[in-house]
Amino acid sequence: MSQMVQAKPGKRGGIGGFFSKLWSQKQLMLMSVPIAIYVFVFNYAPMWGWITAFMKYNPKNKNLFDNPWVGWDNFKWLFNRQEWLGVLRNTLAMSLINLVFGTLSAILLAVLLNEVITKAFKRTVQTVTYLPHFLSLVIVVSMAQNIFASDGAVNQLLMRLHIIKEPVFWLGEGKYFWWLVGAINVWKEVGWNSIIYISTMTSIDPSLYEAASIDGAGRFQKIMHVTLPGIKSTFVVLLIMNIGHLLEAGFEIQYLMGQNLVIDWSQTIDVFVMKYGISKMQYSVGVAAGMFKSVVSILLLFLANFIAKKLDEDTLI
Amino acid sequence: MTDTNLTYKKPRRRQDIAFPIVNAILLILLMFVTLYPVLNTVAISFNDGTDALRGGIGLWPRVWSFKSYESLLSDPATYQAAWISVSRTVITTILNLILTSMLAFTLSRKEYVLRHFLTTMMVLTMYVNAGLIPNYLLISKTLNLSKTYWVYIIPTMFSCFNMIVLRTYISGLPEALVESARIDGAGDFRIFWQIIFPLCKPVLATVALFVAVGSWNQWFDTHLYNAGKPYLHTLQYLLKMKLATTQASANAAKSTADAMTSTTQMTPITIRCAITVVSAVPILIVYPFLQRYFVTGMVLGSVKG
Amino acid sequence: MKKLLSVLLMLALVLALVPAAIAEEEPITVSVFVGNPREQPTPDNKIFKKIEDELGIKFEFEFLAGDLDETLAIKVAGEDYADLMDGGNSADTLINSGALINLMDYISEEKTPNIWTHIQPYLGRLLYDDGSLYIIPNFGRNYNAQIQNYCNGPAFWIQKQVLEWAGYPQVKTLNEYFDLIERFIAENPTNEDGNPYTGFEILCDDWRSFCLRNPVQHLVGRPNDGDVLVDINDNYRVEAFVIQPYAKPYYAKLNEEFHKGIINKDTFVQNYDQYIAKLSSGTVLGMFDQYWDFQSATDALVTAGMDKNTYIGLPLVYDPEYVDGKEIEEHYLNGAVINVNRGYGISVNCPYPERMVQMFETLLSDEWQTILEWGIEGEDYYVENGRFLRTDEQKKNSQSQPWKNANTAYALMDGLPKKQGTRDDGNAWEPGNQPELYFDLMSDYDKAFLAAYGYKVPADFFNPPIELAPYGEAWQIDYVNEPDVSIAETDFVTTQMKYLPEIIMCDPAELDGLWDEFVQAVEDIPISTFIDYMQEQVLKLVEKNSGN
């Protein structure tokens, strides 16, 4: 902890102190500032595009300012569409379901795998469970549609177990849609998502387990007091990050599975924008929707980060 | 759980026997649920296309046919494209690992004055998107990267998500490592390259996997920037095009009035499955090498000593 | 001094040679954008080699892999146009963005006689108000007689075995059709393998949902105008037929069939692949669709030797009871319709527009059309008694994608102006329409089936094509540049696809209420935005075309 003096900027007094500190960190700067410039060029420079949210943009106008200004009209168009609130609700609901169950299932799988002693078995399970990540959603959704059809495997199983009397119309009733999407996402990504937790668990000091054993901790207690705390910071950081992504509920799966019969439950912001954006020459509406998403995301992100800080947890920023 | 504290020996033993069994059963069930659709995809890819239209194929092809693979692999363009894909994946992964971990290291240093500013700047890139057209104009017009190989490398050298993953991992490493190195007079770059970087192997393997898979599966950049240059086509782009062509020719009768009953033996269903297999196999081959690092893990304790 | 002289001499030589080379039509490479997915031709493709040898033109293709509208928007924004641009179904975006040049500057009766003959009869429909033309249509220009072997478009389809079982009756109306299906199912609830038959399928997947939206216009005796009905007897009045009182009986009938178990509710949520799988299994007795949309299922059935489970198209109309006792005459087949504004345009970036138009002109000659459509005589087809035919080997080749990549110009063909219909020597311009080739591939079952009706080709079930209305077919009317109209149209489709399945599945007692709700929802879009625009365009086209 000899660094403490350095770690508190300005303590040494005044501007001179700051610059001498900068100088002492010249290597750190050399390692980071060029990347920052790169990121600026590729991620921030194109942001001029956002001003087209306030225009009636048409790419055929070579001079950007030949496009007429329309103020907030594009945003108003979005927010005044009667389905907008439903779209927002669907987006939030599906990403929340995905966030909760996606994270829990990934952690659960990582923990279970961590308890496996046979290396070969551990590797096999790990390899097999991440395979579905590479199946295209077209294939996955098609299979899901077969499984959840009236005469599909799920209905047959439930009827054989006498849980239901007649087939449930899974795909045709809106109330099931969010959960179907959640189930498909969990199934497809659980193995993939667990990789990050598995790799984090490798950083847990084995002596902690030994110490716990000596203290008489059982298997569950070791999980509770060693394994889970060991992945806590990764969990918190990913959680904050994903809270920022709450408006990203995906596009393809809803697009593929959401027949118009269930459109009141299936349409997400991205699907909506695809339907009414570029394909309707409404370039600016697409940009406006993207901007809305970005702004809300950043607010959510800072809120989550702030709460984490208050709770004295790891933070993203 | 509370009673385990009192008589912990007995339940512990029961746990020790029961838990691994329950655990193994659970994991085997999960494997079954995940493996079935994958094997089903493989089976369909080896089935005759027209026959596959009828559905109902399980784990074994009903009418064997290698036509789908033949059509994918007999095209000489496939190999040129595979070469482009492999090389871009390797280069991107290496560059990305170095740059991303380097930045992650600097942003894990609590004393770094630009830390907060740079972290915020990087994190926000995950949430802001300028939209397709400005990005296209930047890369194609301002930077003039379209119709070049560089468009596969330069825009993809850094990823914020992976940087955060790495930073979180590095922050979890014992602070003493850096301290003692610094006392020995090592500069930040040497600390990063000689101490931190090697220690990050498990998470670097994870990040490498993420980057490689992302880069390998990319087709959109070819579509945007290099579609008119066949020798720069990537494998995924080519496969995507093959699938789209098969789909389109299934509907071709619409325009050409081609009524002749065609027994093409290749349909979008089988082609799609064959494409899935062809694009996943290289990753499956590389995977065990990476998996070694993050499944087995490293014994940090010994390093620390 | 000597050195200087030789340099000057060289310079003079070069200067003298350059114009000569240009006049000689030096070889050029032309970039081509195709708004459809296609595979790259092989570098030694025989037809492209021929074009290169004889016209000095080489092609560099870019095919569409992603979303068309998105791709075109990017090309417009960056002005990244290939020399030849085929914008597919969104070509209007290119025209409206000023990406294409006016071809009429290069087309005239003297300079380009082939093109002139090709477009002259349709100039009224093709030319913009200012007399400009940006695209020479790629399809729908018939020379001599239009060949109609079968119905490639919309119809009510029924398995041939059902008609066979009933003793080959003539099925003309909606009620007769469903009655027949009901009777067949009552007697044969399952097929030979014990799998239950489904009476009627309705494909509702994405844009293919026309299977649910379109039938009513045909039931009242009109050909395919897409989402609207144009009353040619009432000053071309345009209306959204699906909300008219005469549409209700169709959906009420479907409701009735649903409750009789002829329609299964899974049909409303299945995707295209599942639909094709179900058709291919041979257990679906009937559906409304367009032939090209389910052709792959037919292929699967034929391959499996299930010819009796393949389909025949029936041009059904309403029974008189649904339309105040009127007898309706069916008009499913329409006159050939020229594909306005679809095909290649020459972009403003193209350095040799004149040469490109000349290329279209050359390729439109009879010799080149034969090469492009049929291939090389002796290699890709043979001639016997003046008829163009193909050996089994040649037929097989023409179906193989790798072979096509190496031996046909299919990559270029889509957007190219081409001759259709019948050649002066009586052969079909396109191999796919050559009757001999069509009969050759017809199974014995099919031949016997048609013979039982006294027919020769499946198209005999239909009335001959009616004369094309002066506005063409209304689905061709483009509103790419009218966001309000295209939004209204999208909302129209969405509303139909949300309500119509519900109407079909609802308790019959609730049907009236639900129907009113549906009509109200469509009117609230407001649908008038769409209809008014279509009305305006139809009248404009009628006016333009009655001029010549």
Image (cartoon, coloured by chain):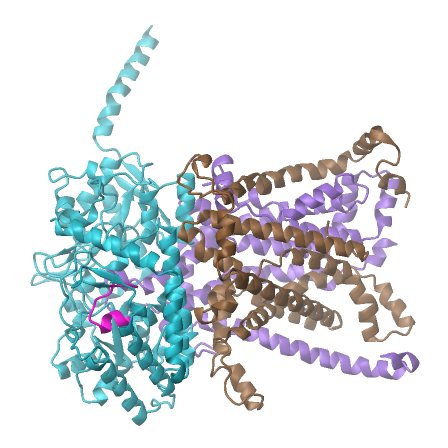
Going by the image, does C344 lie left or right of B294?
A: left
Q: Quadrant of residue A36?
A: top right
Of residues A7 and A47, the one drawn nearer to the viewer in this rendering = A47
In the rendering, what colour is chain B? purple
Q: Position of residue A22 (x, y in %)?
A: 79, 33
Q: Look at the image and tell me whether residue C193 can be seen.
A: yes
Instruction: Locate residue B156 relative to residue B175 in the image: left or right.
Output: left
Q: Looking at the colours in the rendered structure, which chain would you say is drawn in brown?
A: A
Residue C315 drawn at (x, y percent): 21, 75
Image: C476 above or below A127: above
x 33%, y 5%: residue: C1
Main secondary-structure element of the magenta-colored stretch: loop
| Residue C330 position (above or below residue C119) | below
Residue C150 image position (x, y, % from top left): 19, 70
Q: Is residue C226 magenta?
A: yes
Asked whether the viewer can see residue C273, the reply is no
Give me the residue at 60% from left, 45% from top: B157
Magenta-highlighted residues: C215-229
Query: As displayed, is residue B239 above or below residue A209?
Result: above
User: Residue shown at 87%/79% (left/top)?
Assistant: B2
Chain C's colour is cyan
For the C terminus of chain B, the image quarter is bottom right
Quadrant the N terminus of chain B occupies: bottom right
Residue A31 vs residue C513, the one in the foreground: C513
**Figure quadrant of residue C429:** bottom left
The spot of residue B130 in percent (x, y) is 54, 45
Per the image, is A125 magenta?
Answer: no
